[in-house]
């Protein structure tokens, strides 16, 4: 399985939908990912046979992994920035475009520690 994009994250998936939550490595703000409905193709049936149950489980596991990867990708594209100094994945509130890194991105913690200067990459969420 793919490495999760942030150190803290939660899998809130159920049999009906896939849901993941991630937390900024720096300020631990919750960063949500759009939920995905699980479509097993058996939805119209009220009772499943044991074979169908088993199949449903297999399809769910496969789709769950795909949803997890998609959630991580979504985080990379929409929510997190990568600190070039400590390697943390951070939200827009914690990310700075840094002068000393020549436009590279670092987190607030590193910026202060090194005495660097930068502009906050505010996401305004
Ligand atoms: Zn943050
Ligand atoms: Zn950092």
Image (tube, helix red, strand yellow):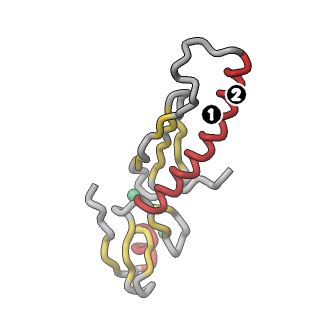
Outermost top residue: 47
Q: Earlier in the sequence, mark 1 or mark 2?
A: 2
Give me the C-alpha separation between circle 1 and circle 2. Answer: 8 Å
Locate residue 96, reporting x and y percent. Answer: 37, 72
Which residue is situated farthest in the left direction here? 124
Q: Nearer the viewer, residue 41 or 8?
A: 41
Residue under the image location 55 percent in, 13 percent down: 46
Crowd around label 2: few <14 · some 14–19 · many ≥20 (10 Å):
some
Query: Residue at 51% across / 37% down in the picture?
Result: 18
Q: Which corner quadrant holds the C terminus?
A: bottom left
The quadrant in which residue 54 appears is top right
Residue 42 at x, y percent in the picture? 58, 24
User: Splitting the image into 4 quarters, where does residue 27 fall?
Assistant: bottom left
| Point 29% across, 65% down: residue | 122
Q: Secondary structure at mark 1?
A: helix
Q: Which of the numbered marks, if any, corresponds to residue 55?
A: 2
For residue 60, which numbered disc appears in the image? 1
**Position in image of residue 34 (x %, y %):** 41, 45
**Viewer-closest of 75 and 116:** 75
Residue 56 sits above or below residue 28 on the image: above
Foreground pick, 7 / 55: 55
- Count neighbours of disc 1 (C-alpha within 10 A) and say few if under 14, some if 14 to 19, many if 20 or more: many
Label 2 secondary element: helix
Q: Nearer the viewer, residue 47 or 96?
A: 47
Relative to 29, is 55 above or below? above
- The reply to whether the residue tagged 2 has its Cβ within 8 angstroms of ligand 1 is no
**Above or below for 85 versus 48:** below
Q: Residue 77: percent from the left, percent from the top?
A: 45, 62
């Amino acid at each position: 399985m793919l490495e999760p994009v942030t150190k803290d994250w939660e899998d809130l998936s159920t049999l009906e939908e896939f849901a993941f939550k991630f937390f900024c490595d720096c300020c631990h703000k919750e960063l949500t990912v759009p939920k995905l409905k699980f479509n097993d193709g058996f939805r119209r049936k009220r009772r499943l046979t044991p074979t169908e149950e088993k199949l449903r489980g297999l399809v769910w596991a496969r789709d769950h992994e795909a949803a997890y990867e998609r959630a991580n990708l979504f985080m990379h594209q929409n929510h997190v920035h990568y600190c070039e100094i400590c390697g943390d994945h951070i939200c827009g509130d914690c990310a700075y475009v840094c002068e000393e890194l020549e436009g590279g991105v670092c987190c607030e913690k590193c910026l202060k520690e090194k005495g660097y200067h930068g502009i906050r990459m505010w996401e305004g969420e």
